[in-house]
Amino acid sequence: MRSIQTRVVALLSSAVLCVTSIHAEPDVTTVKLPYGGIRPQAAIDRAGMIHIVQANSKIKGDLMYVKHAPGQKQFSDPVKVLREASGMAASFNMTVGRDGRVHVFTRPNPRYSKKELGAEAYDAMFKSKARFFVLRYMLHSRLNDDGSAFEDETNIIGKTIGFEGVGAIVADQNSAKVYAFWPGQTEPGPEMGRDMYMAVSEDEGKNWSEPRKLDIDIEGNCRCCPIQAIMDAKGNMYIVYRNSVRTSTASWDKNTFLLVSKDAGKSWNKTLVQKWENCGCPGAPYSMASGTEGVYMGFSTRGTSSFVKVGKRLKINPAPSSSGKSSTRPMVAANKNGDVLFCWVEVQDVVWQVFNRNGDALANVAGRLNGVAAKWSNAAAVATSSGDFLLYYDGHTPAKGAGG
């Protein structure tokens, strides 16, 4: 069991506090993750326990789950997430539901498709013009009742096909309901013809409904960009995704859109967040967070990461970078006071800035960890019950010349 490394980066005198704010500026504690994992995702349950899922490496394709209590120096022993798909994970999303039950949604790599389809059918499809559509599985895994292991994963997406990114999963902490969302299609074809699908579990992920296509035109979907989703305290649901409209033989418009449902997924409305015209294949992930002041989302466009608060008017807050490097892999967390921790990666540096409820950057609550993110990795963040933030990073040795 390894000890974490912490660094608190926010201090404010009581004299200044009385003048400028009705609550203390939050602390940000940076925490190095154990066991060598990358691309962490973290969520906190109602009891204050933090649940973390991370890939064990970009190559090996396994997912690890650990728990961490705020203020503690150690993590729980790692638990493998995947069973039948062990060693075959390509990308994933996670959520925490009622009583701290963890749910993971995984898009496995082609090895899983070959195992399920059989070598002959797989090879025939791979050699055809429909080779991309061997990617036709997304798997739900859930933590068992005593939290000691994950149950066998289940493919819940029916006959939909054509994935490179991964879908999103949302658990209602007030009920046994779990929702899964993913963009897909039922026949091989261009990504401009993709729709958004949804499946629902009424029993904490034991059983799932048949997939249902959402009754809204999403204008296609960039198949390499994973979507993200969240539920707020009122039960409203939000999905952020990137569309796909072809503009030439080698270029697309791939804009960020937000879908919102206020009736448990029965109906949806769509809002344009930011355009990305004449784009190729960005592979840019999203993040979302829900706090007492609302819902926030992080996204990247043309090498700049930003976050917005969901509302009638979307104020885009770009990463305040002075390094001149691109900002990627944005992460957001929101606390009970309306403060927002916005984190991103510059090459292999993890950088963060906290904003108050008015959208103002707090000069004393910002920082940078040089060269700690593995290539293609990200940080993960949660807000604790105290109103402070925990920022998790993987702590890999940087490549030569990386860091700021």
Image: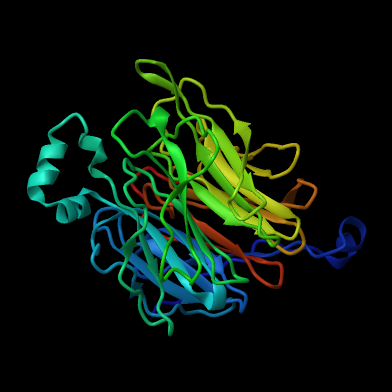
Spot the residue most to the right.
Answer: 19
187, above or below 390, in the image: above
Q: Residue 64's x, y, as percent?
A: 35, 68
Residue 174: quarter of image: bottom right
74, above or below 276, in the image: below
Instruction: Using residue 99 as the reference point, say whether residue 140 is left or right of it.
Output: left
Q: Residue 236's x, y, as percent?
A: 66, 55
192, above or below 371, in the image: above
Q: Residue at x 68, y 67 (%)?
A: 388
The N terminus lies in quadrant: bottom left
Q: Nearer the viewer, residue 176 or 144?
A: 176
Residue 333 in view in this figure:
no
Spot the residue most to the bottom.
Answer: 146
Instruction: Using residue 247 as the reference point, say whether residue 368 is left or right of it.
Output: right
263, above or below 71, in the image: above
Q: Nearer the viewer, residue 342 or 157?
A: 157
Q: Residue 47's x, y, as percent?
A: 61, 79
Residue 323: quarter of image: top right
